[in-house]
Amino acid sequence: MNQPIDFDQIDLMLPPPEQEPDRQYYFTAKAKRYAAEESARLGRPLTCCIQTFGCQMNSRDSEKLLGILMQIGYRETNDEHADFVLYNTCTVRENANKRVYGRLGYLNTVKKRNPDMLIALCGCMMQEAQVVEKIRTSYRFVDIIFGTHNIFKLAELWCRRYEARRDAVRKDAAGPGKGGMVVDVWDSADRIVEDLPVERKYPFKSGVNIMFGCNNFCSYCIVPYVRGRERSRRPEDILAEIRRLVADGVVEVMLLGQNVNSYGKTLDEPVTFAELLRQVDQIEGLERIRFMTSHPKDLSDELIRAMAESKKVCRHLHLPVQSGSSRILKEMNRRYTKEQYLELVERIRRAMPDISLTTDIIVGFPGETEEDFLETMDVVEQVRYDSAFTFIYSKRTGTPAAKMENQVPEDVVKDRFDRLLKRIQEISAEVCGRDLHTVQKVLAEEPDDHLDGYLTGRMDNNTVVHFPGDASMIGKIVDVYLEESKGFYYMGRTAGAGGG
Ligand code: 5AD
Ligand code: SF4
């Protein structure tokens, strides 16, 4: 958005425009008017609370959703007693779904005390037909459901629900879900809607979507089914967004995609991720570039070179291995072997010896034997990750792996998981201490949750540092002397303060 939009200038006597994003500006203006009436009736500002489950993609979507709600006139709160509560859900593992159902039970009791409250659900879980069906029948107090492809429509859906409820109340309808639930879930997205309002969580750093969806179809993963086919944003849109962010005070961007290494393939004029990275690197005023997530099969030498030659690209790479067994990797449809992965790691380290590597590992994929598991342990020993996210395999209906025989017994998986986690933590404690007693550039991010007068920040390689400082330093990159290693993080002090 180059010019801020004056929502009060939009003529609501006209029918809604057909084109996006104009259509949404129209509905935002309408919702703003309704919300103002509601707020006047209650004699206080309206509040909204967004709870985000899952990954950075969802966090970024939540910033867009909050941007729309703030334009409508809501104030943000963490309290689930808010006037509008939105759950942005995840379905990557079964546990994520269970948590949402559990929390919905609680929301029902809150809504019984405040029937004016609106409850909305969106995100990956809503892309599953059986989930929507269950909510329609068993959670009828929910007001709005939408999916991952149409988050830009929040204002329009909000208006529909508001009007339906208002008309139902006028007719004196009773019962939960007065006026009916608004459900709008799309199977796929044919376009990317640009230029909607966004409310960033941090003023100094921001996620930037560069692509949506995934074409990989790893056999355990539900993401391609709920996030759709791979679509890349045009480089000029991405660069323009980053320039605006920088002008607005952002010093660090995280380029987001399910598989950033295959960025650009679907564009009319294809561009590689390495080319995009080099262009982002040129943006004046931007200090740090991160990206997530890289599929090892698509990580090119060209990208390694672009990273190594850049001063802004952070020395951190998240490179999910998932398993160390070539046999299991084949079953997972990952399209690389253990040897190819290790060789890739070697090439990356040769180009950037100080790089910090992190990964994702799944334990207990169907058919995983003790030998397969030991191959995974071996990769962990050889790579020596800075940290790793470990997951117990979760069966997702609709994925090829869910139909595989030889699901591994729970106690066996648990035992392997514990052994893996222990070893990862030991290695991590050794590896993360390597910068002790040096001065590092740290982006001061927020007041420390536990220590008064301290800030929390991140080094270039993503390691967390706690150090004494005041709010005026937040958003700045400062030199910090690392005094003490605590395994996964450091205690430090600003270099120059008190010697060292
Ligand atoms: N079970 C367990 N973990 C999974 N992941 C994705 N799908 C599953 C599943 N069915 C993990 C992968 C991925 C991370 C985001 O979640 O490790 O990289
Ligand atoms: Fe969850 Fe994956 Fe969806 Fe992210 S993309 S919200 S991790 S299911």
Image: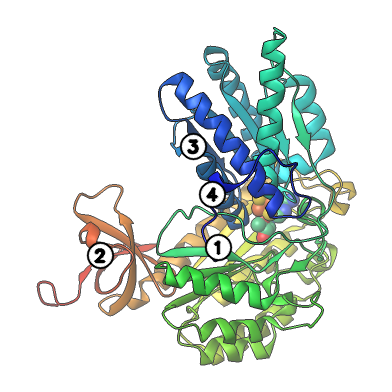
Q: Secondary structure at mark 2?
A: helix
Residue drawn at x 64%, y 72% is 237
Sequence-first disc among 3 and 4: 4
Mark 2 and mark 4 in contact (Cβ < 8 Å)? no
Quadrant in which the C terminus is drawn: bottom left
Q: Secondary structure at mark 3?
A: loop
Residue drawn at x 24%, y 57% is 471
- Tell me the CA gap for discs 3 and 4: 10 Å
Q: Please name the amino acid that badge 4 sits on.
A: Gly
Locate residue 13: give its quadrant: top right
Quadrant in which the N terminus is drawn: bottom right
Sequence-first disc among 2 and 3: 3
User: Quick one: label 1, few (<14), some, or many (20+) residues within 10 Å?
Assistant: many
Decide if residue 416 is in sight here: no
Instruction: Residue 62 in the image: state x and y as whole percent.
Output: 57, 48
Q: Please name the amino acid that badge 2 sits on.
A: Met
Q: Which residue is mark 1?
A: 388
Relative vertical location of residue 238 with respect to residue 229 in this rendering, above or below: below
- Tell me the CA gap for discs 1 and 2: 30 Å
Q: Which residue is mark 4?
A: 67
